Image: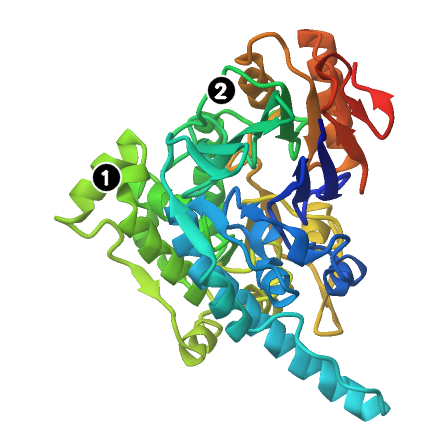
C-alpha cells in the first residue's frame, strides 16, 4: 500500500498552500497557492513546480484566497489537464480573483520590463495572465457542502463549511489502495466562531490524519464584544482628529465583514458623520458574488440581508470603480473612511491612499487582517517609523491600529476546540503558520489534549502506510 502526503507550501510559513497526496498511482493536489511577502518570497512563484503537473490526477481547492488558489493558472499552463474541485462559491470567486491576479501580474511585468530596458536587460514574461486565468477556469468543478462523492478510483471527497470566507471548505478524503484505507482531513483555513457573515466551522468526528492550519496558533483573539468596542473607539477618536481613516482590507471576506458591521452599527458608531468609500474593483465584484450565495450566510446576516432588500443600510457608501474616482478620493482631507486593497498593503489602491495620508498626524490606519512577513502591512503593524512606496521613503505619522479580533482565522483556543471534536485523537500535522505560531499550537495540543502532533517542513513526506506509526520525514509522529 502506498498512501503519503508531501508538503510543498505553507510549511513553516503562512502563504503558498500546496500539498501533494499520493494514493497508489493516483496523485491529488490540495491547493496551489501563491507565495506572498517580500520580493524574495514572491520570486519563488516563478520557480518550476517541484512535481510534474501532467502527473496530477485531480486538484482540490479549499478556498479562493490567492495564497491557496493563485498558482492554478500556472499549473494548467504547465500541463495539468484534470479537474479542479472546489465549492461552487469558491469557483465563482476564483473567476474574478484569478483574473485580477493575472491583470496585476501583467501590469507588474510591464513596469519591470521598463526598468530592464533602461538597464539593457532582457524582458520577462508575466508569471500569469488574464488569459491564463480564463483557461484555468474551464477546469473548475463547483461542488456543494456535505455531499460525499467519488472523484477518482479509490478516492472519495466531501467538503464541509470552514467558516473562513464564502465557500471555504474543510476537505475530507477517503483513500483506498491495495485493500487498505485511510481518512485524511485537511482543515483549509478555519474561521473564528462567531465572526460576522458566515456560519461557524463544521465539526468533523473521524480521521486517521488531520492536516491543520496554525496561522494564529500562538495567540488568542479579543472577544467579539471587545473587538467591536475597539472599532467604535477608533472611529470616535478619528472623528475629533479631522483626518481620514484608511482600512486596508482583503477583497474577499474582510471587506464584506466590515460592510456588514458598518451596516449593523451604523447609528451606534456614528457612521453618518463619514463618507465611506469602497475603493476596490475586485472587492466590489466579490461583494456581488456574496449576494449570489446568501444561502451560506449565518442567521444574523441572513436577517440583515433580508432587511437590506427593503432599505439602504449604508446611505453614505460610495462605490469607487474607476481610476479617476479613486484619485478623486485623495483630494478629501478629512471625513473619509477608505476601504481598499490590498489587505497587506503590497499593491492595489491602498498604496495611493497611504501615499496621501500616512505622513499626516490627524489620520488613522486600521489594520484588520493577517500581515505576512516582508509586507508593508506587517511593517506598519510592527511599528515602522518609515515605509517605502514606489521607492520613496515616507514617514509614518498616522496612528496605526491593529484590530486583531476581527480575524477570519481561528485563534489557538478555537483551533484546539475544533481538533478536540475528533474521536481518538488522530495524528495532526500543522501547516499554514509561521514557526512561532505553529510551535505554540503544537505545544498546546500536545500538553492539553495529548495529541500526536508535528509541524510540516518544506518537501517533507508523511507516510500513512502504517496507521499506528505515521512518519513525517522518517520520524514517528507522537
Residue nearer the viewer, 154 or 8: 154
Element on which disc 2 rests: loop
Q: Earlier in the sequence, mark 1 or mark 2?
A: 2
- For label 1, the crowd category at 10 Å Cα-Cα, with few meaning under 14, some 14 to 19 and many 20 or more, is some
Tell which tag, 1 or 2, sits nearer the viewer: 2
Left or right placement of residue 92 versus residue 105 in this view: left
- For label 2, the crowd category at 10 Å Cα-Cα, with few meaning under 14, some 14 to 19 and many 20 or more, is some
The quadrant of the image that shows the N terminus is: top right
Residue drawn at x 76%, y 54% is: 374
Residue drawn at x 64%, y 29% is: 211
Left or right placement of residue 336 versus residue 318 in this view: right
Colour scheme used in the picture? Answer: rainbow
Residue 244 is labelled as: none
Measure the alpha-carbon separation of dots 1 and 2: 29 Å
For label 1, the residue is 304
Residue drawn at x 59%, y 48% is: 57
Residue nearer the viewer, 204 or 448: 204
Quarter occupied by residue 393: bottom right
The quadrant of the image that shows the C terminus is: top right
For label 2, the residue is 204
Provide residue 233's location: percent of width, then percent of height.
Answer: 47, 38
Residue drawn at x 49%, y 68% is: 135
Q: Is residue 157 visible?
A: yes
Quarter occupied by residue 132: bottom right
Element on which disc 1 rests: helix
Provide residue 261's location: percent of width, then percent of height.
Answer: 36, 41
Residue nearer the viewer, 351 or 80: 80
| Above or below, 398 relative to 130 | above
Q: Residue furthest front?
A: 178
Provide residue 71's location: percent of width, then percent of height.
Answer: 62, 58
Amino acid at each position: 500500500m502506498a498512501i503519503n502526503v508531501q508538503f510543498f507550501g505553507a510549511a513553516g510559513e503562512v502563504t503558498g498552500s500546496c500539498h501533494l497526496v499520493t494514493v497508489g498511482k493516483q496523485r491529488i493536489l490540495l491547493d496551489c497557492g501563491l507565495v506572498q511577502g517580500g520580493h524574495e518570497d514572491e520570486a519563488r512563484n516563478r520557480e518550476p513546480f517541484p512535481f510534474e503537473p501532467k502527473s496530477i490526477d485531480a486538484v482540490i481547492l479549499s478556498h479562493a484566497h490567492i495564497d491557496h488558489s493563485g498558482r492554478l493558472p500556472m499549473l494548467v499552463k504547465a500541463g495539468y489537464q484534470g479537474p479542479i474541485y472546489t465549492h461552487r462559491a469558491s469557483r465563482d470567486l476564483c473567476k474574478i480573483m484569478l483574473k485580477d491576479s493575472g491583470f496585476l501580474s501583467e501590469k507588474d511585468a510591464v513596469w519591470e520590463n521598463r526598468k530592464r530596458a533602461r538597464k539593457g536587460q532582457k524582458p520577462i514574461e508575466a508569471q500569469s495572465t488574464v488569459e491564463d486565468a480564463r483557461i484555468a477556469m474551464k477546469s473548475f468543478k463547483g461542488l456543494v457542502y456535505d455531499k460525499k462523492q467519488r472523484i477518482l478510483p479509490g478516492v472519495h471527497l466531501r467538503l464541509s463549511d470552514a467558516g473562513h470566507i464564502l465557500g471555504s471548505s474543510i476537505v475530507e478524503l477517503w483513500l483506498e489502495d491495495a485493500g487498505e484505507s485511510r481518512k485524511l482531513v485537511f482543515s483549509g483555513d478555519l474561521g473564528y466562531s462567531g465572526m460576522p457573515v458566515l456560519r461557524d466551522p463544521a465539526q468533523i468526528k473521524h480521521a486517521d490524519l488531520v492536516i491543520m492550519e496554525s496561522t494564529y496558533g500562538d495567540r488568542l483573539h479579543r472577544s467579539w464584544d471587545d473587538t467591536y468596542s475597539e472599532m467604535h473607539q477608533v472611529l470616535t477618536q478619528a472623528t475629533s482628529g479631522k483626518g481620514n481613516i484608511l482600512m486596508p482590507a482583503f477583497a474577499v471576506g474582510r471587506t464584506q465583514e466590515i460592510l456588514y458591521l458598518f451596516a449593523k452599527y451604523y447609528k451606534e458608531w456614528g457612521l453618518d458623520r463619514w463618507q465611506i468609500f469602497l475603493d476596490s474593483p475586485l472587492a466590489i465584484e466579490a461583494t456581488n458574488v456574496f449576494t449570489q450565495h446568501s444561502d451560506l450566510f449565518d442567521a444574523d446576516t441572513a436577517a440583515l440581508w433580508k432587511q437590506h432588500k427593503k432599505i439602504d443600510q449604508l446611505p453614505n457608501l460610495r462605490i469607487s470603480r474607476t481610476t479617476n474616482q479613486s484619485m478623486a478620493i485623495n483630494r478629501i482631507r478629512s471625513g473619509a473612511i477608505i476601504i481598499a486593497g490590498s489587505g497587506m498593503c503590497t499593491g492595489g489602491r491602498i498604496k495611493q491612499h497611504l501615499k496621501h495620508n500616512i505622513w499626516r498626524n490627524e489620520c488613522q490606519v486600521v489594520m484588520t487582517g493577517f500581515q505576512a512577513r516582508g509586507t508593508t502591512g506587517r511593517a506598519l503593524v510592527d511599528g515602522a517609523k518609515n515605509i517605502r512606496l514606489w521607492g520613496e521613503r515616507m514617514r509614518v505619522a498616522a496612528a496605526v491600529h491593529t484590530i486583531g479580533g476581527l480575524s477570519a482565522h481561528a485563534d489557538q483556543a478555537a483551533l484546539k476546540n475544533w481538533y478536540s471534536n475528533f474521536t481518538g485523537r488522530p495524528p495532526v500535522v500543522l501547516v499554514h503558520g509561521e514557526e512561532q505560531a505553529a510551535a505554540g499550537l503544537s505545544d498546546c495540543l500536545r500538553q492539553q489534549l495529548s495529541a500526536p502532533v508535528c509541524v510540516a517542513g518544506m518537501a517533507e513526506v508523511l507516510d500513512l502506510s502504517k496507521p499506528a506509526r505515521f512518519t513525517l520525514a522518517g520520524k514517528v509522529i507522537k
